[in-house]
Image (cartoon, rainbow, N blue to C red):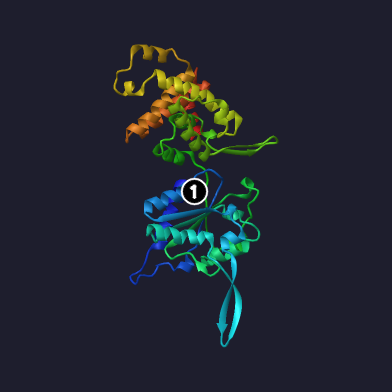
Amino acid sequence: MNIKQATKHIKATIEAYLEKDEYGNFAIPVEKQRPLFLYGPPGIGKTAVVEQIADELGIGIVSYSMTHHTRQSALGLPYIKTVKFGDEEYQISEFTMSEILASVYGYIEETGNDKGILFLDEINCVSETLSPSMLRFLQYKSFGSHKVPDGWVIVTAGNPPEYNKSVREYDIATLDRVQKIDVESDYDVWREYALKRNVHPAIISYLDVNRQSFYHIENTPVRKEFVTARGWEDLSRLMRSFENKGVEISREFIEQYIQVESIAVDFYEYYGIFSKVQSVYCVDDVFNKTITAQAITELKNAGISEKIGFINYLSVCLFNVLSDAVLLNNALKALAFILKTDDLTDATGIEFAAKLKTLLNEQH
């Protein structure tokens, strides 16, 4: 499922886990509440989704990456405890509270929020020594003698082995104790999120016409090439900061986030056109019908790439300004796609309509 569908599913599950009956008991007993396991490629927004759900439900969240934990930090440190059985005293091994669980209890003490999500990222990358204890944790929600507080739901995440060499594939015994949710990348869903998060309009308008560049991971003979949703969002943040400071946005800078050379170069060239469009054709003037005759003439005489850049930029601005601009936004995206397609240059009449229909079907 895509990340939007996964969000709805996770939110509904957490609400069900936190629901109580008329006697104050959890409607679904804690021992029957399977931890959720978000499984999918890196950088598609798994962590962001969990944080968003916690915020929407008004509950707490404590996050840990399991790749950083040893058996000692996850389970706690051993110590000797003296106990008495009958008339005899014995020394037995006990464990201090896990660092992970201590953080949850500390959060409750600090905030007073006794409901929340314990989010364990990279759950299938735990060390070999910690792996057996994780099976018990997923089933009994405890490390040693210390349990996850009631009212806290366990949500985990992990990548398939082809994306991370540290992954340990789960066996059936483990998978039978979690609720596994397969998540995949989806540009349309990410675009909704990106608009709300004010992702740079150059990125959104570029991806509108180059959807194939949104997410790509490949192991080439030379290096690993990848571009992810996380990469685009992180690039956006620093682009805005650089623009505010007047710092040049270079091709080398873009390649630090978009690590597929052909996509990075293409976006860099597009950004140059986009920047010119922003400076020459003021969108506010277009909205207010005060655009100058000189700007109109320059747009008429502009090259096809610049015209596409203007349409894409206008499309994003319209979407941000008007709540009912979805259809117009889609129409503008289609127009940009048509202008970019050389195959329609000489087509007319019925032939044009037939080719356009075919191209739009291929696009979606």
Q: Can residue 168 be seen in this snapshot?
A: yes
Q: Quadrant of residue 24?
A: bottom left
- Residue 265 position, x and y percent, is 57, 26
**Left-right relation of 11 to 134:** left
Q: Can residue 115 be seen in this snapshot?
A: no
The residue sitting at 39% across, 26% down in the picture is 314
- Residues 265 and 359: in front is 265
- Residue 157 position, x and y percent, is 53, 52
Residue tagged 1 = 47
- Residue furthest to the bottom: 87
The residue sitting at 58% across, 49% down in the picture is 159
- Residue 147 position, x and y percent, is 49, 67
- Residues 147 and 9: in front is 147
- Residue 347 position, x and y percent, is 48, 19
Secondary element at tag 1 = helix
Q: Quadrant of residue 108?
A: bottom left
Q: Amino acid at mark 1?
A: Thr
